[in-house]
Each structure stands twice: as structure tokens, then as C-alpha cells.
Amino acid sequence: MNSGNWLGYALLATAAWGVWGAFTGVPSEHGFPDTLTYVVWALTMILPAAWAMRKVGWRLKRDPRSIALGLAIGVLGAGGQLLLFHAVTLGPTYLIFPIVSLSPAVTIVLSFLLLGERTGRLGIAGIVLAIVSLPLFDYSPEEGAHVGLWFFFSLGIMAAWGLQAYYIKLANATMDAESIFAYMTLTALLFIPAACYLTDFSKPVYLGLSGPYLSAAIQMLNAVGALLLVYAFRYGKAIVVSPLINAGAPLLTTAIALGLAGTLPGAYKLAAAVFALIGAVLLSLQPE
């Protein structure tokens, strides 16, 4: 693939995360805790990180700026993931995920104000449709949900992941994508003790094929998608890449889930799918 083909990397990341999203909850349905799924995901990051570092001769950027940016990117990503595990135990997922899914808005604002990124009319229309579609993928109008600690956790995760995407783009100006991903892998591994601490081992943990082994296969898609994301940010504008991937992946996840269930989506998911599809097409058509 041409190194400058940001759209190719973005579409591959979308495909990897779309399939991952459709099946990531299966191991937990068999009794494998989500917190241990985090551990599995962190370990699967090692293989693509090793591939990437081998590609550049194992040369890791180790100047103070690279270390600071690399660790910041990793901490924001891994920390947000762990915070999400705790948030879903406190509040309704049908409200948490729509809030978290608005993280591209943070990336777009920062990239516009601090990096001076701009796009044309097609890109602007695509960004707007993608942002509008994100909350609708997980929204379900139900009563009885009150604002609590989960709401502030959700805002924190949204800010963390939006800021992470901005820092990835910022770091790509002086760092190679391989070093960025290596630091992401390192920090993901450093959070493993925290994930184990949050795991309720008083309950049975399923360790069969549908538990950690299936989780490893699924989470490998997550890890590869993360590497592709870094490459997409390296060669494309953050204000375009972020909404494209964050709208496209849920669209694919929804399509796969509906295909397996053999049912039609509700009005909100159908509207989200239409908005995301049109937005993705407009973003792909917008010339750099």
C-alpha cells in the first residue's frame, strides 16, 4: 500500500474495528470478565508492535518529546479503556457509549484550532453527518436513567480518547508511527495490574476456548486496528480521519450484528447508519 494512502489505512482500521465490535462481547457472555479482556487486548498489542518495530530496524524514538507524547497517547487510551469498564458498572450503556462516541468532536476542535487543519465543503458535510450519527448507534430512549458518577466518567473517557487522537496526529509530525504504537503497547501493558485489581475473582472465570482464546483472536483485530489508526493519522488530516473511522466502524458492527440476528434496526440505528454511510462517502470523496 502506498504510504500516502491515508484512506486505505482508515478503511482497513474501520474494517478491523467494525468486525471486532461485533464480536468483542462474546467471551464475556461465556463468563470471561471484561477486565481480563483488557489484559488479553494488551498482550495482543505485542505482536503488531513487534512487526512495526522490525519494519524500522527496532529504532525507537527516545528523545524527551517522543517519550512524553508516546506515554501520553498510551495513558489516555489505556486509562480511558479501564475507566469505561468501571463506568458501565455504574450507569446505562445506552447513554454511556453515545457520549463516549463523540470523542472525534474533541479531536476536530483541537486540530482546527491548534494544528490549523482545514477541509473542503464535502469534508465539512461528511464530518457533520459522521458526528451526528455516532450517538444514534447506541441510543435507546428509556426512562429511569439519572445523571450520576457514570456521566462524569463518560465525559472523561470522551475527552481522553479525543485528546489521544489529537496527540497521535501531533506526534506524527516528529515521530514515526512505529514508535508511537510501541509506546501505546508499553502503556497498555503497564495497566494490566490495574485491570486485574478491578476484576472480581470471587466469581467464576471461564477459561475455555470461548473465553481467553476467542478473546485473543477478537482482540487481535482491535490491536491491528489501532496500528492502522496511527498510520491513517500519519498521512491524513485528523479532522477527517477521526470521524470517518469512528462512524464507519459502528456502521459495520451494526450491519454484522443485524445480519447475524436477522432483524431490522430501529429508527435510531437506521438513521445512524444512513448518516454514517453518507458521511463516510463524502469524507472519502473530499480531495486532500
Image (cartoon, helix red, strand yellow):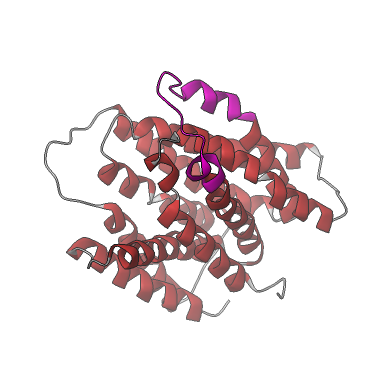
The foreground one among 48 and 58 is 48
Q: Where is residue 52? Give x, y as percent.
A: 76, 55
Q: How far across and how far down the image is residue 143, in percent?
A: 11, 41
Rendering coords of residue 24 (x, y %): 45, 49
Residue extending furthest front?
208
The answer to whether residue 205 is magenta is yes
Front residue of 237/37: it is 37
**Looking at the rendering, in which quadrant would you find the C terminus?**
bottom right
Instruction: Residue at 50%, 51% (x, y): give it.
Output: 110
Instruction: Tell me which corner region of the image, top left, top right, bottom left or bottom right, holds residue 271.
Output: bottom left
| Chain part drawn in magenta | 190-214
Please determine whether, in this image, residue 140 is positioned above or below residue 118: above
The magenta stretch spans residue 208: yes
Using the rendered image of the protein, determine whether residue 279 is visible from the camera's viewpoint.
yes
| Quarter of image, res 44 | top right
- Above or below, 94 against 238 in this view is above
Check the image and report above or below for 240 versus 81: below
Outermost residue toward the top in this view: 202
Q: Which residue occupies the foreground of this view, 4 or 65?
A: 4
Q: Say if residue 76 shows up in the picture.
A: no
Query: In percent of the image, x 48 and y 45: which residue is there?
Result: 210
Q: Residue at x 57, y 51 (%)?
A: 217
Q: Nearer the viewer, residue 208 or 271?
A: 208
The residue depicted at 36 percent of the width and 68 percent of the height is: 276
In the rendered image, which quarter contains the N terminus? bottom right
